[in-house]
Image: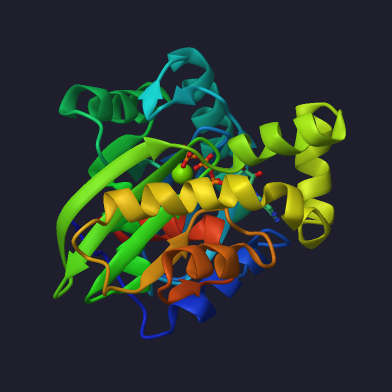
Amino acid sequence: MTLTAVRPAHSAEFCLDRVARCLEAAPVPLSGELHAGVDLGTSTAVLTVTDGDGLPTFVASEPCEALRDGVVVDFAEAVEAVSRLAAAAAAGTGRRIAAAAAGYPPGVGASESRACRFVLERAGLDCTALVDEVSAANAVLDIGDGVLVDVGAGSTGVGIFRDGELVEVGDVPGGGHHLNLILAGALGTSIEEAERRKRTDGAGHLPILRPGLERIAVSIERLSAGHGSLPVHLAGGGLMLPGAAEIVSQYLERAVVEYPHALYITPLGLAWSSP
Ligand SMILES: Nc1ncnc2c1ncn2[C@@H]1O[C@H](COP(=O)(O)OP(=O)(O)OP(=O)(O)O)[C@@H](O)[C@H]1O
Ligand SMILES: [Mg+2]
């Protein structure tokens, strides 16, 4: 189910670039009713706000490890993170954010996904919609026929789209955190240092990370079995390494499309999914 509030007539790339610019300063003036989305992830919680024209106007993220394998394991930490994000959004936009759409990882049950709604409500936000993360991402990417893959820190979610309809969905462990574990093991560093090195010199560490990236490719292959002719579109921060998409493409022997600022695709789609 995707409830698209206001989708501007700009490309996904234009809107994602605007999200990235919001990290530096919120664009002003704001026009119309604001729409917000909250993406609770394994490593971060992200709140995105769009204006009345659907244009990204504010984004903020908080480190938050309250989710594991798609399940809220630390409710209090998640509530605190979302409360801080809502306060930051109010300060950044000059408007109180009273409601937001929440995302949940594809493949989790209804009761687990409801936990995301409860997190928002406890943080003082009405939950306007509960949307699976691949449908939210596709509100931005607008894939007709293709495989949408959201590789985050902890999990790889896959949605198969045919004629713009989500026909299959799945989610398995594996993402950026697992790449950190491989790098930390190989370099003999802490996981935090591995994360830093991955971000500052991702290309330089590709040979070490290749097996981990191929493992993610295996997950994509399994979760899109029977749809091998469809191109793969990458959302999420987990594969934001120069050369990672090419490794996945070589392994799968199919086209892989990457996007700038991919970790903001799902958060933006959630704001667009808030009526
Ligand atoms: N510039 C970068 N280069 C490499 N990796 C990056 C970069 N920026 C973010 N990441 C990785 O992206 C991951 C976070 O992505 P994202 O925000 O999509 O995950 P999440 O939503 O928290 O997790 P999940 O969806 O699995 O619950 C982290 O593992 C981080 O290391
Ligand atoms: Mg995520």
Q: On the rendered image, what quadrant is the C terminus found in?
A: bottom left
Give the quarter of the image for residue 148.
bottom left
Horizontal and vertical percent position of residue 46: 52, 44
In this rendering, the answer to whether 217 lies above or below 139 is above
Asked whether 235 or 121 is in front, the reply is 235
- The structure residue drawn at horizontal position 77% and vertical position 48%, both measured from the top left corner, is 198
What's the colour scheme? rainbow
Q: Is residue 95 visible?
A: no
Q: Return the residue nearer the eye: 202 or 62.
A: 202
Q: List x then y, in percent, for residue 238.
A: 57, 50
Question: Residue 113: horizontal and vertical position, in percent?
Answer: 26, 30
Count of number-bearing discs: 0
Q: Give the camera-side residue of 255 and 98.
A: 255
Above or below, 46 against 267 in this view is above
Q: Residue at x 78, y 32 (%)?
A: 184
Q: Residue at 55%, 39% (x, y): give it.
A: 153
Q: Is residue 162 visible?
A: yes
In the rendered image, which quarter is residue 58 located in? bottom right
Viewer-nearest residue: 257 or 117: 257
- 9 to the left or right of 79: left
Question: What residue do we see at 37% from left, 37% from top?
Answer: 172
Seen in the image, is 270 located left or right of residue 228? Answer: right
Percent position (x, y) of residue 99?
34, 42
Image position of 143 (left or right of 89): left
Task: Specify the quadrant of the image occupied by residue 261.
Answer: bottom right
- Drawn side of residue 256 relative to residue 61, left or right: left
